[in-house]
Amino acid sequence: MPIYEYRCGQCEKQFEATQSVHARSEDTVCPFCQAQQATRLLSQFASKVVGTHKPGFSEMKAYDMLNERTDKFSKLPPVFGKRTAPPPMDATIGSGGPPSNPTDSSGS
């Protein structure tokens, strides 16, 4: 069960209480004046990693998934990549493409 910090609304003293997560702050009784006017405070805490940080299983799994996705995306073509140049006009004449000179296609 977590330890919560409170301030009494009547006597203005701060105190700590070990309560369930589901406990309401309105039901908390001040140990000094027995009033039910406690306000829950935001607690400060400090954390320090001693020694080298060793990743846990969840971190290793996340890195594996990231590497797998990166490999999949590297095989895809670029979304906004360079456009390929059209084939030269000489190559399209023999393949039934448009003629190189539009005046020759009139039949005169």
Image (spheres, helix red, strand yellow):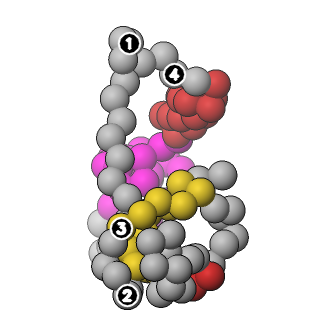
Residue at 42% from the left image edge and 63% from the top image edge: 15
Q: CA distance from mark 2 to mark 3?
A: 11 Å
CB contact under 8 Å: marks 2 and 1? no
Q: Residue furthest top?
A: 51
Q: Which residue is mark 4?
A: 55
In the structure shown, which secondary structural element does the residue marked by tag 4 occupy? loop
Q: Which residue is mark 3?
A: 14
Q: How many marks?
A: 4
Q: Which residue is mark 2?
A: 10
Instruction: Report if residue 107 is visible in the image.
Output: no
Badge 2 crowding class, 10 Å Cα cut-off, few under 14, some 14 to 19, many 20 or more, is: some
Could you tell me residue 14's position as x and y percent? 36, 67
What is the chief secondary structure element of the magenta stretch? loop
In the structure shown, which secondary structural element does the residue marked by tag 2 occupy? loop
Could you tell me residue 53's position as x and y percent? 42, 18
In the rendered view, tell whether residue 72 sits above or below residue 21.
Answer: above
User: Callout 1, which amino acid?
Assistant: Thr
User: Callout 2, which amino acid?
Assistant: Gln
Q: CA distance from mark 4 to mark 1?
A: 10 Å
In the structure shown, which secondary structural element does the residue marked by tag 3 occupy? strand
Q: Which residue is mark 1?
A: 52
Q: Residue furthest front?
A: 33
* Nearer to us: label 4 or label 1: 1
* Nearer to us: label 1 or label 3: 3
Q: Which residues are magenta?
A: 76-100
Residue at 38% from the left image edge and 86% from the top image edge: 9
The residue closer to the viewer here, 36 or 67, is 36
Q: Say which mark, if any, is on residue 39.
A: none
Side of 80 where 58 appears, left or right: right
In the structure shown, which secondary structural element does the residue marked by tag 1 occupy? loop
User: Callout 4, which amino acid?
Assistant: Pro
